[in-house]
Amino acid sequence: MSNVTVCVRFRPLSSKEKRDLGDNICIQSMDSETFIIKDEKEEGFTFSFDKVFYEESNQADVYEFLVLPIVRDTVNSINGTIITYGQTGAGKTYSMEGPNILESDEKKKGILPRVVDGLFACIKTSADSTKYTVKLSMVEIYMEKGPF
């Protein structure tokens, strides 16, 4: 895996979007790394990523492909960063937290609770007697305004 992995995740349409847009789907799945977006003129624009998570992808799929390698590296003293980016309503919070940060449903848990669980599981099963200090930071920038 390279030092930077770039993925895209499509969330399912909401019931309002389905009602307003009908079956006008502009995304065409090509494979696990490529998709095409068609505009109003039916012109196709192809985009490629390290991984494409389509609507049917679940939280565990994202965690296992994208995040688990970062968690394992952090136990070996390699810093890791996860960045989500997109417009309001795109699904960033759902991917990071799940429907509720305190949600106990294993299938719906987001990246953050999975990172905490995975990090401590890796530490617990570590063969050496290393002492660990765990630091986790999270910053949300909303409307280009940070917590400054």
Image (cartoon, rainbow, N blue to C red):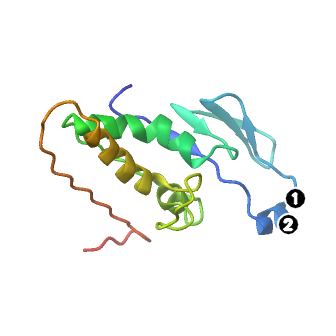
* As drawn, 77 above or below 113: above
Q: In the displayed structure, would residue 76 be above or below residue 88?
A: above
Q: Residue furthest top?
A: 1
Categorize mark 2 by other alpha carbons within 10 Å: few (<14), some (14-19), many (20+): few
How crowded pointer 1 is (Cα within 10 Å; few <14, some 14-19, many 20+) is rated as: few
At 48% from the left and 43% from the top, the residue drawn is 63
- Quadrant in which residue 147 is drawn: bottom left
What is the x, y in percent for residue 22? 87, 59
C-alpha distance separating marks 1 and 2: 6 Å
The C terminus - image quarter: bottom left
Residue drawn at x 26%, y 56% is 136
| Of 61 and 12, the residue lying toward us | 61
Locate residue 84, reporting x and y percent.
45, 53
Percent across and percent down for residue 59 are 56, 48
Does the image show residue 6? no
Looking at the image, do the residues carrying marks 1 and 2 touch, with CB atoms under 8 Å apart?
A: yes
Name the disc covering residue 22, or none: 1
Task: Please provide percent x and percent y for residue 111.
Answer: 45, 52
Q: Amino acid at mark 1?
A: Gly
- In front here: 29 or 111? 111
Q: How many marks?
A: 2
Q: Is residue 16 left or right of residue 76?
A: right
- At a point 43% along the width and 51% down the height, the residue shown is 114
Q: Give, as a three-letter code, the residue at label 2.
A: Arg
Res 77 → quadrant: top left
Assign the N terminus to one quadrant of the image: top left
Q: In which image quadrant can residue 20 be found?
A: bottom right
Q: Specify the label residue 19 is tagged with.
A: 2
Give SS at disc 2. helix
Question: Could one spot residue 10 in this view of the protein?
Answer: yes
Residue 131 is marked as none
Identify the residue at image location x=54%, y=44%. 60
